[in-house]
Amino acid sequence: MKLNASYTSLVAVGDSFTEGMSDLLPDGSYRGWADVLAARLATGTPGFRYANLAVRGKLIRQIVDEQVPIAAALRPDVITLVGGLNDTLRPKCDMGMVRDRLEEAVERLAPACGTLVLMRSPGRNGPVMERFRPRMEELFALVGELADRHGALVTDLYGAPSLGDPRMWDVDRLHLTAEGHRRVAEAVWQSLGLPAESDWQTPMAASAPVRWAQRRVDDVRFARQHLMPWIGRRLTGRSSGDGRAGAHFDAGLGQAFWITPEDVSAPGPVTGWRRLDG
């Protein structure tokens, strides 16, 4: 672990979890933990650069084929890699393939950056978590093995009670709320050896139980708005990320771009970003 380190560039690789769903901004874009982390790293770091390549719905083979080469070419101080969980949630999952492709990703990214951060992702407590737990734990065991072998850091969120709380998850039950993303950013921040600003593991304050009738209404809404469309995509081989590019990837030019704080002279919090070309 690097203590009191200075990080001047960050590239985020992955799927919807890293893209930032469901941390929705007023303009319709997503923020998410990687963006929160970048803004914190940029504070007081002149010339800080950031690129988020993550795309919702991507499987590990797509992440490795489409994002990993780009991230490696950018050669940042820090790369975050979170992938493979979408594979484990499919009815049919080739865990051998997942293992091979994730290992390939780490082997390519670790030498291309100063610090590679891997993650054991959080899960919402409930029946879905229990059904796929064996696959998830197999994936997370591999994450630990690869980190040890390649000198990567691991941000371990799996099983943290604070992030298993259903109130930390959006109505789709797959993506964290803004508060959940903020806590993940703090966890990665601490993994990087930076001084804690809050305790991301502190449980949410107790609240009154949701009434039975309201839970049934929520279940029906969830099934209609999120579960059935998700099943439909699985049956037809489609993905929510089809035709999408990462936030900082120019599909027209076929290349990624960096963003940097708009006000390069301000030492305080980042209030906006601008694109760097060339």
Image: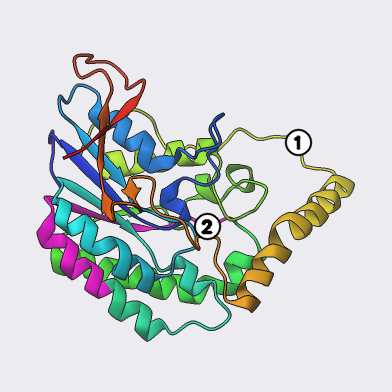
For discs 2 and 1, the disc positioned in front in the rendered view: 2
Q: Is residue 186 above or below residue 133?
A: above
At x 63% / y 66%, what residue is drawn? Answer: 128
Position of residue 239 measured from the top left corner of the image (x, y, whole percent): 54, 66
Badge 1: residue crowd in 10 Å (few <14, some 14–19, many ≥20)? few
Instruction: Give the amino acid at mark 1.
Output: Ala
Q: Alpha-carbon neighbours of circle 2 within 10 Å: few (<14), some, or many (≥20)? A: many
Q: Secondary structure at mark 2?
A: loop
Residue 105 falls within the magenta-colored stretch = yes
Q: In the image, what residue occupies the spot 33% across and 45% down?
A: 248
Residue 74: x %, y % from top left: 16, 51
User: Taking the image as drawn, is residue 173 in sight?
Assistant: yes
Left or right of residue 136: residue 270? left
Residue 220: x and y in percent read 82, 56
The residue carrying mark 1 is 208
State how far apart marks 2 and 1 are (Cα): 22 Å
The residue located at (57%, 36%) in the rendering is 204
> Could you say which is closer to the camera, residue 194 or residue 53?
53
Give the colouring mode of the picture: rainbow
Q: Which residue occupies the foreground of this view, 256 or 139?
A: 256
In this rendering, the answer to whether 179 lies above or below 235 is above
Does residue 192 appear in this view?
no
Judged left or right of residue 92, residue 64 is left
Q: Secondary structure at mark 1?
A: loop
Picture quarter containing residue 5? Answer: top left
Amino acid carrying mark 2 in the image: Gly
Q: Is residue 57 magenta?
A: no
Question: What residue is drawn where x is 49% and y is 40%?
Answer: 30
Q: Disc 2 designates what residue?
A: 123
Q: Is residue 44 above or below residue 245?
A: above
Q: Which residues are magenta?
A: 103-124
